[in-house]
Image: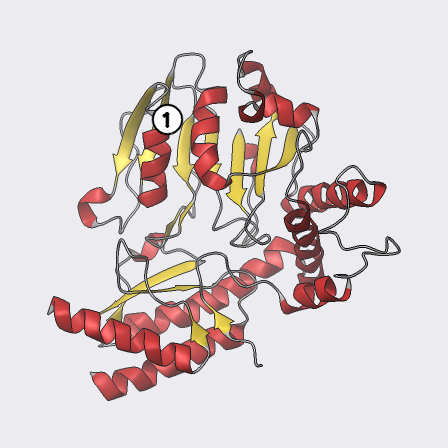
């Protein structure tokens, strides 16, 4: 069966060459005679896999030596609780920009453990822009941003300057889509199911001095100290997801690294946004200066809600019929959304735009 172009926000499509290599190694990884799915995480084979995965991530992201790299579980949703539990421990308060659904969840979890101060919100315009930072607290334990808002389609193209306050960012949807200066952050974290691997593993990057803030007596699984001391293997890690992450890192190197990926991603985004900006039928609801490179929500100009929903359903149904799948917008915002992560080829975006032109001509 012919493969489709998968525009899902996550789990998302993986590079075809990665899937083929994984298929070739499914029954026997190297000379082990077993699948990575079957092997012990304490085996020399898997120890080499996870070590290679870390080494490749460090190289691809140019991570300085004074940072720990962890492969954990629980996704960003667990990080929303672990971060304040481990790091909101000095003055019991942290600053947040309020920029969409995942930022809201980060605030809600932090508020259970201390004061979560919102220093800028774009809720007033349905999250269609990134707010100015006003009222930042120099005594905040950290400042948290959602680097790329997956649902709403906004992205920080310039990293906020928060002074000496440690900056923490959820980079789930933007990780390795472009070059990012890790040294500007105290902590970075990313659910893998966008640009890194299948769901199940979470990449966490922690500046080593932040470890001094972690209190004693935390539940073992909720303390970053536990995972640093045990090199991400305190308990059985998501072995197969880490293996695929390693293969994706190798693929990224083959593409020329994040700088080369950015050029390809920028071209895909340009083609799609250019069509939306010139269409009389479709449009992007996001302010141009902060549009996401990875997640492109779009709507139709039909004012009548019922007619608009009917058109949206028709669009999604017809795209699925020609192998352009998972284009329905998130249930909280409706409309449509095209997630064009690293593994989405240029041909997929061109096929989408070609169909959108035909759909507009037939339905406008």
Across and down, in percent, residue 24 comes to: 76, 66
Q: Residue furthest left?
A: 304
Across and down, in percent, residue 234 comes to: 67, 29
Residue at point 54%, 16% (across, down): 214
Across and down, in percent, residue 323 comes to: 46, 78
Q: Nearer the viewer, residue 204 or 266?
A: 204
- Identify whether 147 is placed above or below 353: above
Query: Quarter-wise, where is residue 258 in the image?
Result: bottom right
Q: Is residue 129 left or right of residue 296?
A: left
- Identify whether 56 is placed above or below 295: above
Image quarter hosting the N terminus = bottom right
Across and down, in percent, residue 275 comes to: 34, 74
Q: Nearer the viewer, residue 84 or 164?
A: 84
Q: Residues within 10 Å of mark 1 (few under 14, many from 20)?
A: many
Q: Is residue 183 left or right of residue 302?
A: right
Residue at point 46%, 30% (across, down): 167
Image quarter hosting the C terminus = bottom left
Q: Is residue 163 visible?
A: no
Q: Nearer the viewer, residue 246 or 272?
A: 246
Total marks placed: 1
- Identify whether 92 is placed above or below 309: above
Residue at point 81%, 59% (across, down): 28
Determine which residue is flagged by label 1: 110
Q: Is residue 223 visible?
A: yes
Q: How is the image coloured?
A: secondary structure
Query: Quarter-wise, where is residue 318 in the image?
Result: bottom left
Where disc 1 sits, the SS reads helix
Residue at point 67%, 33% (across, down): 232
Query: Quarter-wise, where is residue 93 in the image?
Result: top left
């Amino acid at each position: 069966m012919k493969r489709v172009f998968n525009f899902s926000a996550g789990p998302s499509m993986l590079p075809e060459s990665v899937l083929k290599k994984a298929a070739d190694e499914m029954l026997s990884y190297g000379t082990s005679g077993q699948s990575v799915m079957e092997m012990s995480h304490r085996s020399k084979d898997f120890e080499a896999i996870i070590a290679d995965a870390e080494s490749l991530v460090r190289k691809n992201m140019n991570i300085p030596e004074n940072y720990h790299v962890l492969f954990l579980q629980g996704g960003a949703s667990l990080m929303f609780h672990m971060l304040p539990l481990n790091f909101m421990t000095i003055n019991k308060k942290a600053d947040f920009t309020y920029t969409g659904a995942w930022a809201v969840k980060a605030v809600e979890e932090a508020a259970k453990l201390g004061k979560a101060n919102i220093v800028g919100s774009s809720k007033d315009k349905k999250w269609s822009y990134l707010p100015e930072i006003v009222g930042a607290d120099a005594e905040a334990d950290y400042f948290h941003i959602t680097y790329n808002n997956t649902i709403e389609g906004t992205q920080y193209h310039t990293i906020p300057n928060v002074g000496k306050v440690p900056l923490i960012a959820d980079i789930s949807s933007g990780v390795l889509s472009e070059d990012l200066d890790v040294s500007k952050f105290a902590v970075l974290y990313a659910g893998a199911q966008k640009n890194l691997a299948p769901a199940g593993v979470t990449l966490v990057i922690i500046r080593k001095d932040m470890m001094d803030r972690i209190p004693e007596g935390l539940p073992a699984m909720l303390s970053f100290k536990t995972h640093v001391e045990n090199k991400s293997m305190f308990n059985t890690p998501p072995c197969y997801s880490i293996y695929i992450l390693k293969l994706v890192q190798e693929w990224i190197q083959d593409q020329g690294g994040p700088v080369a990926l950015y050029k390809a991603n920028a071209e895909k985004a340009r083609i799609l946004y250019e069509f939306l900006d010139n269409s009389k039928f479709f449009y992007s609801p996001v302010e141009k200066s902060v549009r996401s490179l990875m997640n492109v929500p779009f709507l139709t100009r039909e004012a009548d809600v019922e007619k608009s929903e009917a058109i949206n359903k028709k669009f999604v149904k017809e795209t699925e019929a020609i192998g352009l799948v998972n284009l329905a917008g998130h249930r909280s915002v409706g409309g449509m959304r095209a997630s064009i992560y690293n593994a989405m080829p240029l041909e997929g975006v061109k096929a989408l735009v070609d169909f959108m032109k035909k759909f507009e001509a037939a339905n406008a």
